Amino acid sequence: MADKPKPRSEKDIEADLSATRDRLARTVDQLTFRASPAELKRRQLEKLKAKGNEMAFDAQGQPRFDRLAGALGGVSGMALVVGTMRRVFHKR
């Protein structure tokens, strides 16, 4: 036959309820922190910085000149296009 669970005292039940309330309060606090706009922004910036470092540096921490040269070429090309467009559209 199955053993019957022994009856619990009122103090035991209250202690369990109190512990459950404390765990629930901590969980709600953690969820509130994780969902806060400041924390979301911090995590996204952290991911963006990590991605930028991954793209600009190799595993040993050395700059990836091929990618940096491509980025600089793109920036200089865009500057030339903007400069040419300004010259064309802002003639006096």
Image (spheres, rainbow, N blue to C red):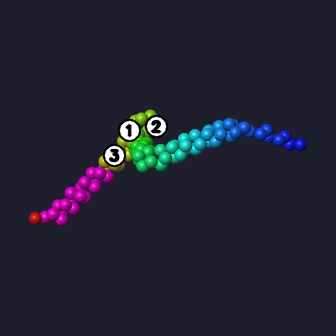
Instruction: Pick whichever of labels 3 and 1 is earlier in the sequence.
Output: 1
- Please, which residue is most extreme toward the top here? 60
* Three-letter code for the amino acid on which mark 3 is drawn: Ala
The secondary structure type at the circle numbered 1 is loop
The CA distance from mark 2 to mark 1 is: 10 Å
Q: Position of residue 72 (x, y in %)?
A: 31, 48
Residue at x 28%, y 54% (from the top left corner)? 77
Distance between mark 3 and mark 1 Cα atoms: 11 Å
Which of the two residues, 2 or 73, is positioned nearer the viewer here?
A: 2
Q: Can residue 84 be found in the magenta stretch?
A: yes
- Which numbered disc flags the more N-terminal residue, 2 or 3? 2
- Whether tag 3 and tag 1 are in contact, CB under 8 A, the answer is no
- Residue 9, image x, y percentages: 72, 38
Instruction: Provide the residue span drawn in magenta.
Output: 74-91
> Which corner quadrant holds the N terminus?
top right
In the shown orientation, is residue 83 left or right of residue 23? left
Tell me the quarter of the image containing the C terminus.
bottom left
Give yes or no for contact between labels 2 and 1 (Cβ–Cβ under 8 Å).
no
**Residue at 47 percent of width and 49 percent of height:** 35
The residue indicated by pointer 2 is: 59
Classify residue 79 by image quadrant: bottom left
Report the disc number at residue 63. 1
Q: Secondary structure at mark 3?
A: helix
Determine if the magenta segment contains residue 52: no
For disc 3, the marked residue is 69
Amino acid type, mark 2: Ala
- Residue 37 in sight: yes
Q: Residues within 10 Å of mark 2 (few under 14, many from 20)?
A: few
Instruction: Identify the mark at residue 23; answer none if there is no mark.
Output: none
**Which kind of residue does numbered mark 1 sit on?**
Pro
